[in-house]
Image (tube, rainbow, N blue to C red):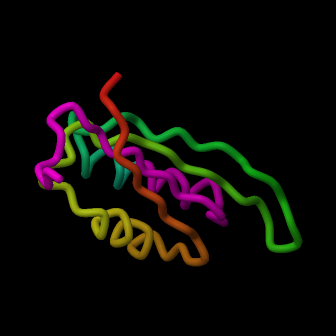
Amino acid sequence: MDNILDKNAQLEVKIINLRATDEELETLRGYIVRGLGTNGTPPIIKTDGIDVKGFRHIVTFKVLDPQNFKIDTVKDWLHATLLVGWQLDATFVPKQ
Protein backbone atom coordinates (compact mmCIF):
# COMPACT_ATOMS: atom_id res chain seq x y z
CA MET A 1 0.00 0.00 0.00
CA ASP A 2 1.26 3.45 -0.94
CA ASN A 3 1.10 6.04 1.85
CA ILE A 4 1.69 9.03 -0.41
CA LEU A 5 -1.38 11.22 -0.72
CA ASP A 6 -2.84 11.02 -4.20
CA LYS A 7 -2.18 14.27 -6.07
CA ASN A 8 -5.76 14.12 -7.31
CA ALA A 9 -7.27 14.06 -3.80
CA GLN A 10 -9.11 16.85 -2.06
CA LEU A 11 -10.15 16.89 1.58
CA GLU A 12 -13.87 17.31 2.17
CA VAL A 13 -14.50 18.74 5.64
CA LYS A 14 -17.92 18.52 7.29
CA ILE A 15 -18.88 20.03 10.64
CA ILE A 16 -22.18 18.66 11.92
CA ASN A 17 -24.32 19.19 15.01
CA LEU A 18 -23.09 22.79 15.10
CA ARG A 19 -25.17 25.11 17.26
CA ALA A 20 -24.34 28.72 16.46
CA THR A 21 -25.88 32.13 16.01
CA ASP A 22 -25.76 33.89 12.65
CA GLU A 23 -22.91 36.06 13.96
CA GLU A 24 -20.91 33.02 15.10
CA LEU A 25 -21.46 31.36 11.73
CA GLU A 26 -20.18 34.47 9.93
CA THR A 27 -17.12 34.56 12.20
CA LEU A 28 -16.44 30.89 11.45
CA ARG A 29 -16.95 31.50 7.72
CA GLY A 30 -14.36 34.29 7.94
CA TYR A 31 -11.82 31.99 9.61
CA ILE A 32 -12.33 29.36 6.91
CA VAL A 33 -12.15 31.79 3.98
CA ARG A 34 -9.11 33.66 5.32
CA GLY A 35 -7.39 30.53 6.59
CA LEU A 36 -7.68 28.58 3.34
CA GLY A 37 -7.52 31.42 0.83
CA THR A 38 -7.40 29.99 -2.66
CA ASN A 39 -6.72 26.50 -1.27
CA GLY A 40 -10.36 25.98 -0.28
CA THR A 41 -13.91 26.24 -1.48
CA PRO A 42 -16.24 28.71 0.22
CA PRO A 43 -18.06 27.07 3.14
CA ILE A 44 -21.64 25.97 2.58
CA ILE A 45 -23.82 26.40 5.66
CA LYS A 46 -27.15 24.60 5.92
CA THR A 47 -29.62 24.45 8.77
CA ASP A 48 -30.05 20.85 9.85
CA GLY A 49 -32.92 21.22 12.30
CA ILE A 50 -34.02 22.76 15.54
CA ASP A 51 -34.37 21.48 19.07
CA VAL A 52 -34.80 23.00 22.52
CA LYS A 53 -31.26 24.40 22.39
CA GLY A 54 -31.73 26.14 19.03
CA PHE A 55 -30.79 25.59 15.42
CA ARG A 56 -28.31 22.93 14.34
CA HIS A 57 -26.15 23.58 11.29
CA ILE A 58 -23.93 21.67 8.89
CA VAL A 59 -20.88 23.42 7.44
CA THR A 60 -19.03 21.84 4.51
CA PHE A 61 -16.03 22.91 2.47
CA LYS A 62 -13.14 21.35 0.56
CA VAL A 63 -9.41 21.78 0.93
CA LEU A 64 -8.16 21.68 -2.66
CA ASP A 65 -4.54 20.75 -1.92
CA PRO A 66 -4.47 19.03 1.48
CA GLN A 67 -0.76 18.12 1.42
CA ASN A 68 0.18 20.41 4.35
CA PHE A 69 -3.27 21.02 5.83
CA LYS A 70 -3.87 20.00 9.44
CA ILE A 71 -7.44 19.23 10.51
CA ASP A 72 -6.59 20.61 13.96
CA THR A 73 -6.65 24.02 12.30
CA VAL A 74 -10.43 23.65 11.87
CA LYS A 75 -10.75 22.71 15.54
CA ASP A 76 -8.79 25.87 16.44
CA TRP A 77 -11.20 27.99 14.35
CA LEU A 78 -14.19 26.40 16.12
CA HIS A 79 -12.65 26.96 19.54
CA ALA A 80 -11.71 30.56 18.67
CA THR A 81 -15.36 31.17 17.80
CA LEU A 82 -16.30 29.64 21.20
CA LEU A 83 -18.39 26.91 19.57
CA VAL A 84 -18.84 23.58 21.34
CA GLY A 85 -20.78 20.35 20.82
CA TRP A 86 -19.89 19.87 17.15
CA GLN A 87 -18.65 16.81 15.29
CA LEU A 88 -15.89 17.12 12.69
CA ASP A 89 -15.43 14.74 9.76
CA ALA A 90 -12.77 14.91 7.04
CA THR A 91 -12.73 12.58 4.04
CA PHE A 92 -10.41 12.41 1.06
CA VAL A 93 -12.36 12.65 -2.20
CA PRO A 94 -11.25 12.74 -5.85
CA LYS A 95 -10.82 16.14 -7.48
CA GLN A 96 -13.78 17.22 -9.56
Residue 45 picture location, percent across and down: 58, 43
Q: Residue furthest right?
A: 52
Instruction: Determine whether 33 is above or below 89 in the image.
Output: above
Report whether 36 appears left or right of 79. left
Whether residue 84 sits left or right of residue 54 in the image: it is left
Percent of width and height locating residue 9: 26, 37
Image location (x, y in percent) of residue 53? 81, 73
Q: Position of residue 90 (x, y in %)?
A: 41, 55
Where does the C terminus fall, quadrant-wise?
top left
Q: Is residue 20 visible?
A: no
Q: Residue furthest front?
A: 1
Q: Residue at x 66, y 66 (%)?
A: 19
Query: Residue sitting at 21 percent across and 34 percent down?
Result: 38
The answer to which of 78 and 14 lies nearer the viewer is 14
Left or right side of 58 for 30: left
The residue shown at (43%, 42%) is 61
Q: Residue furthest top?
A: 96
Look at the image and say whether residue 64 sits in the magenta stretch. no
User: What span is in magenta?
Assistant: 1-29
Q: Against 29, is 86 above or below?
A: below
Q: How many marks?
A: 0
Regarding residue 45, the answer to whether it shows in the image is yes
